[in-house]
Amino acid sequence: MIQRIQSVYLLVSTLLLGLLFLLPFAEIVKDGAIYTFNFKGILLDGAVQQSGIAISVFIVVLMALHGFAISSFKNRKRQKMIVIYIILMLLVLFGLFIYYTYLSFSGAQIGLKIGAILPLVAIVIDYLAIRAIDKDEALIRSIDRIR
C-alpha cells in the first residue's frame, strides 16, 4: 500500500534509480580526451568506447525489485528480505561504477557526478524503509497482544 511510509521510501528509491538513466555518473579525462560515463557505458564524443549494458540491466532489475517490494506490503517479512537484497545489489552497482571508472582508466583524472552518488542515497532510503517495516511489524504484534 502506498500510504505506508516504507512504500513511500521504496518509491523514492525507485525514482532515484530511474534518474540514473538521465544523469551522467562521471567524467574521465585521459590524455586530453574527455570521456563521459553514463548508463550506456563510457563514451568519447558520443561513440561508445566500453559498453555499459551490464549497468543498464542491473538498474532495471533493481527497479523491478523495488516494485516487487512495494507490492509485497502484506508480507512484511518478505518485503524486508527483498529490501536487504536490494541494498546488497546497490552496493554491487556502486562497485561497478568504481570498476568502470577507476580500474578501466589508470592514471586518469576522474570527476564523479551526482549519478554516482544516487545509489548510496538509495541505500540510505532503503535502510529507512527497513526500519519502517520493523516498526510496522512491531505495531501489528502489539495490537495482537491486546486482543
Image: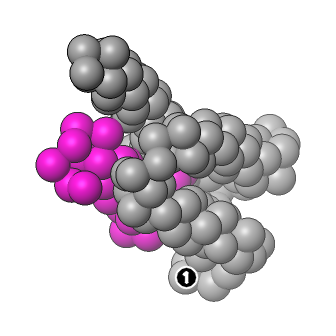
Among all residues in the image, which is located at the extreme front? 147
Q: Residue at x 78, y 47 (%)?
A: 99
Q: Quadrant of residue 125?
A: top left
- Please indicate, yes or no, whether residue 60 appears anywhere in the rendered image: yes
* Identity, as a three-letter code, of the amino acid under mark 1: Gly
Among all residues in the image, which is located at the extreme bottom? 47
Q: Colour scheme used in the picture?
A: one colour
Q: Residues within 10 Å of mark 1 (few under 14, many from 20)?
A: few
Compared to residue 67, the image places residue 109 above or below, namely above
93, 87: nearer the viewer = 87
**Where does residue 40 sit, x and y in percent of width and height?**
60, 75
- Label 1: state its secondary structure: loop
Placement of the C terminus among the 4 image quadrants: top left
Q: Left of 33 or right of it: where is 74?
A: left
Q: Which residue is mark 1?
A: 46
Q: Residue at x 32, y 24 (%)?
A: 144
Compared to residue 58, the image places residue 96 above or below, namely above
**Where does residue 129 sit, x and y in percent of width and height?**
38, 34
Residue numbers of the magenta segment = 1-26
- Please indicate, yes or no, whether residue 38 appears anywhere in the rendered image: no
Q: Residue at x 45, y 30 (%)?
A: 130
